[in-house]
Amino acid sequence: MADASELTEWLASGEAFAASGPVGRIDTHAASIFLNGETAWKIKRPVDLGYLDFSTPDKRRTALEAELRLNRRTAPDLYKTVHSVARDQDGALAIGGDGEVVDWILEMRRFPDGALWSDLADSNALNEAALRNLADALVGFHSKAQIAWPGDGAARIGQIVAGNAAAMALYPDILDPKSVSELTERLVRLIDHNSGLLDARGKAGRIRHVHGDLHLANIATIDGVPTPFDCLEFDAELATTDILYDLAFLLMDLWQRGLRREANMVFNRYLDLSPDDEGAVGLMPLFMSVRACIRAHVSAARAKRGGAGDAGEDAAHYLELACRLVIDERPGLIAIGGLSGTGKSTLARALGADFGKPPGARILRSDVLRKRLAGVFAETPLPASGYTAEASRATYMALDGLAWAALATGQGVIADAVFGMAEERDAIEEVAGRADCPFTGLWLELPEVGRIARVAERPPDASDATADVVRAQSQNLTSIPANWARLTSDASLETLASTARLLLDPLVLIATEK
């Protein structure tokens, strides 16, 4: 059997790969990765941490083979194969050799430096297209993930909360015991309040074998495609959870980095494509807070081990974040109306992260809902039959119903539609009245020539508006809402959004720090 230090030194030297240049090395608490040319080689460290056990070669082989199999679900071109590491009669080690097998190693394709989303986030380089593509990929992945069908969704998340509380209690000098206790009580109350929904989601097939470790450092842009990798492979039960809890790790990671708008965009795009999850928007603060708790005690443990960086400060920060994520926020409803090309959807995205509970408002866009009702993808153009009076009535009814459902969970809502008819505006205001929440109506205006120019420059989008549609709307508009704030949208987005925020009830805005 190869000694652990002997194996890592041999790999780090480059002798294993006949490397002509230096070999990069990355160490984690349970693995070591060696970078050589266009290939990355990964071994498991011989550790037993309780929740994972890689203490024998057979256990390391099992873990690496599981890692290969499970990560091919999201990154098939990244994960190549598992090789044996053998020792010949002369005592020399070789990857795939004919001698006695002493350990196992995973061969992977190496992606370029700077491809990790944690690095892209740090450099503010996550653009809207990449975020949308990642959300699309996650919806597709979750829809195909193995279903568990349990009816114990509340108990499952409750066990995680209890485990987090016990883990955080081990570090009272880093994680304030009073804050931990109060937060745990708050999370338990939220689970009790939502127990019926959590259990029902399991019975409906929303608990699946998912990624399990979906934070920014486990996502990379490879060949232009956002690619999740390095899933939780060592415990299938631990990786079997609510799909929105899986998503919550990504949203929490974005949120804590100050990338609120990005988190809100991913959240809304995911729900736009996953209607079966619309009724669970109110679970997101709970799920995000639990994820932050995990990061808090993991960072505290790293600080105790003498880890590099400000691990202790990170731990305290994550605990503070976990507490803020579940502070009660008053729900509110914003309706943004105006003719095509006035910038309704752009303004909605700019306001979404500042409104409602984390990860921000549920943005309900009539163009997306129209496509959903027609059974087509959001960016698929509809024929004229998709824009009949009957189709439009059904779209607005769906918008009103989803707005009410989200408000009932305590989440803020932004309704994005033309709202060109008085009855459409009255209906959305009635939703706010039924929910007993603040309502703000914003009506955007822009001269026809500007609206035509914007529509012509628009990339592929859920809106099918053309220049002819814009002209027809100008002629057919019969009334402008007298009780909605009228805003001219020819100013910069920053100016428009700032003006709109001043019109909102301060109680429904998410403060930067609370």
Image: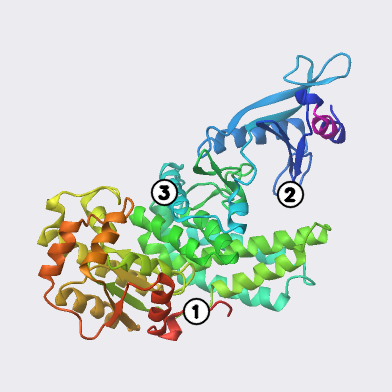
Mark 2 highlights which residue?
A: 50
Around disc 3, counting alpha carbons within 10 Å, would you say few (fewer than 14), some (14 to 19), or many (20 or more)? some
Which dot, 3 or 2, sits closer to the camera? Answer: 3
Callout 2: SS: loop
Above/below status of 431 relative to 38: below
The answer to whether residue 462 shows anywhere in this view is no
In the image, what residue type sits under mark 3?
A: Asp
Principal secondary structure, stretch drawn in magenta: helix
Q: What stretch is highlighted in magenta?
A: 8-14
Cα distance between the residues tagged 3 and 2: 35 Å
Residue at the (65%, 31%) spot, across then down: 38
Q: Which is nearer the eye, 90 or 337?
A: 337
Q: How far apart are marks 2 and 1 (CA)?
A: 36 Å
Q: Which amino acid does label 2 sit on?
A: Gly
Residue at the location (16% across, 53% down)?
386
Which mark sits nearer the N-terminus, 2 or 1? 2
| Residues at circles 3 and 2 in contact by the CB criterion of under 8 Å | no
Position of the C terminus, as image quadrant, is bottom right
Q: How is the image coloured?
A: rainbow
Q: What kind of residue is marked 1?
A: Asp
Residue 364 image point, x, y percent: 32, 65
Q: Position of residue 142 (x, y in %)?
A: 44, 47
Is residue 21 rendered to the left or right of residue 269? right
* Residue under the point 30% across and 70% down: 415
Q: Is residue 326 above or below residue 466?
A: below
Q: Disc 1 on helix, strand or loop? A: loop
Specify the quadrant that holds the N terminus: top right
Nearest to viewer (mark 2 / mark 1): 1
Badge 2: residue crowd in 10 Å (few <14, some 14–19, many ≥20): few
Q: Residue 328 carries which label?
A: 1
- Residue 136 disc label: 3
Q: In this view, does 193 lie to the left or right of 278?
A: right
